[in-house]
Image (cartoon, grey):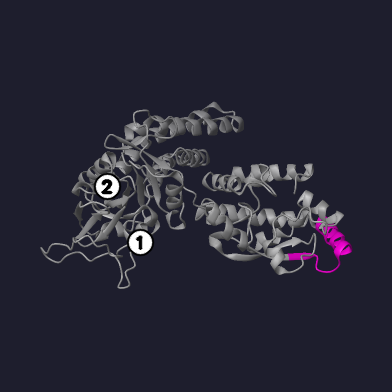
Amino acid sequence: MVQTGSTTGRTSGGPDKQGDDRVAKPAVPAPRPAPEGNAEPPTERILIEGTSKSTVVLPYIPSASAAKTRPLRAWMLALPVDLAALLAPIAWSQQYWKATVAVALLTVGAFAVGGLYRARRHMSVLDELPSIYFRFLAATAAVAIVVAARHESFNYIDGFLRLAAVSAVLLLPARAFSRIAVLMARRRRWVEHSAIIVGGGPIAIELARLLRRYPQYGLRFAGFVDVPSTAHIGRESSPLVGHIEQLQQLVRYTECDVVIIADIDCPEDRLLRAVRAPGMENTDLWMVPRLREFPGTVGSPDHIGAIPVVPLRRANLSGPKWAVKRTSDVIFASVALFLLSPILLVCAVGTFFEGGKGIIFRQQRIGRYGEPFSLMKFRSMRPVDDTESQTNWNIGHDPRVGPFGKFMRRTSLDELPQLWNILRGDMTVVGPRPERPYFVDRFSVDYPEYAMRHRVPVGLTGLAQVSGLRGDTPISDRARFDNYYIENWSLWLDVKVVLRTVSEVFRGGGR
């Protein structure tokens, strides 16, 4: 383990006056100002515990240009330039403007889906050329079919195709211009993003050397992050900015936009806890594949020098993604409340006749980022007290649950009042099911992956539930399914979960 301390061997968290021999966890240092004039920057000595080896590392100094260009993204230049090239033929003829606009929008959408607006380390128009024209021709063919169906005149179709050919000619220099502009800005360090490397082996050291030497990759190397398998004892493996457990804090400290995982040999759950932390969700995550000699077949290849790097998909339900999900939630909940109002009335009447007043049962649950909220359900039984309702697990077979309550629980009709929780913003339609604070605390200790479920809003239904993990089922399995859903979210995945939920309700697959 690496500790920061003096050259005498005592760590910063060494024994106190009472003789306590515990070593304090090293804290993330505050950024230091740049040295004035020719003065040498202050240094720290990194001591390897249990050995006499140490190395001097320089403190991290945030980059002014990286701070200024943090909001910039790859699509901000490429997308408007592509649109200008695709729409330019309208200047020659306005007769076909509708078809030309349709081709432009379809092409830009195909480019976005194909990853042509993602940030790349190695930029080459020739590498992108096949994908660019394949997607452009596919969009043109789709619009041409519609044009041919609406206009039987051969002259009209011929005129549209001629303008499409002009767009095809302009598309290549437009894409070349945007790429050259970005490369020039990178080489002159007008545009750069801070990057830290997790690991310190030969590949990680080579990556750091490449980033320092070649600014065209657009990354300013900010330092290494230590893992147990790495010995940062040489100058080539410095600066060391912190440890894997501090990754979330280190991202803030170094003003980091990119994290590259390389040469790392640590338990998977430890790495997952670090990269799944809430503070990491707006950071690009790249990984050097273990089998570097065998190229992958999925996605567009990228590399730094001759070292392949693979962008990892991040779970980031914010920005446009969250706007889409939230809009669909409001529409779904509003329509469902209207259409299901007769069923809600039947459930309310049945609950009243079976158990008297208090048809709505409110219970505290934990939502996104660990925030508590009041969840609503139709009451299927009366708990003895509030402590029982908060700490008793799975009451489906409790003798106090009446016939109507069992029916509602089996068909999940008791969950319908949560549509109001969705409208209020406490929940979403599809997401990890909410749990009570008592069990969240217990499960988070026993299962490290469980706490990561709270990166997104909790849901009325979830992938784990429609996969048979309801009631008294393994918590570890539920956590794995929930995290899989978070990391592979799409609107279509939500639709699939909702359809499977409806199927489960009609089959009576509730608890």
Query: How far apart, in angstroms, are the residues tagged by discs 2 and 1?
Result: 18 Å
Q: Earlier in the sequence, mark 2 or mark 1?
A: 1
Say whether residue 358 is magenta: yes
Q: Position of residue 4 (x, y in %)?
A: 26, 59
Could you tell whether 21 is left or right of 427 in the image?
left
Q: Residue furthest top?
A: 154
Where is residue 21, by image quadrant?
Answer: bottom left
The residue at which mark 1 appears reads as: 25
Q: Is residue 482 above or below residue 420?
A: above
Secondary structure beneath dot 2 equals: loop
Q: Is residue 272 visible?
A: yes
Q: Amino acid at mark 1?
A: Lys
Q: Amino acid at mark 2?
A: Ala
Where is residue 460, by image quadrant?
Answer: bottom right
Please state which of residues 428 and 278 is positioned toward the viewer in this rendering. 278
Q: Is residue 148 above or below residue 257?
A: above
Q: Residue furthest front?
A: 19
Secondary structure beneath dot 1 equals: loop
Please state which of residues 447 and 432 is positioned toward the viewer in this rendering. 447
Could you tell whether 371 is left or right of 41 in the image?
right
Assess whether mark 1 and mark 2 are in contact (beta carbons under 8 angstroms). Answer: no
Which residues fall within the magenta stretch?
343-361
Q: Position of residue 171 (x, y in %)?
A: 38, 37
The residue at which mark 2 appears reads as: 231
Chief secondary structure of the magenta span?
A: helix
Q: Position of residue 260 (x, y in %)?
A: 35, 46
Q: Position of residue 229 (x, y in %)?
A: 33, 45
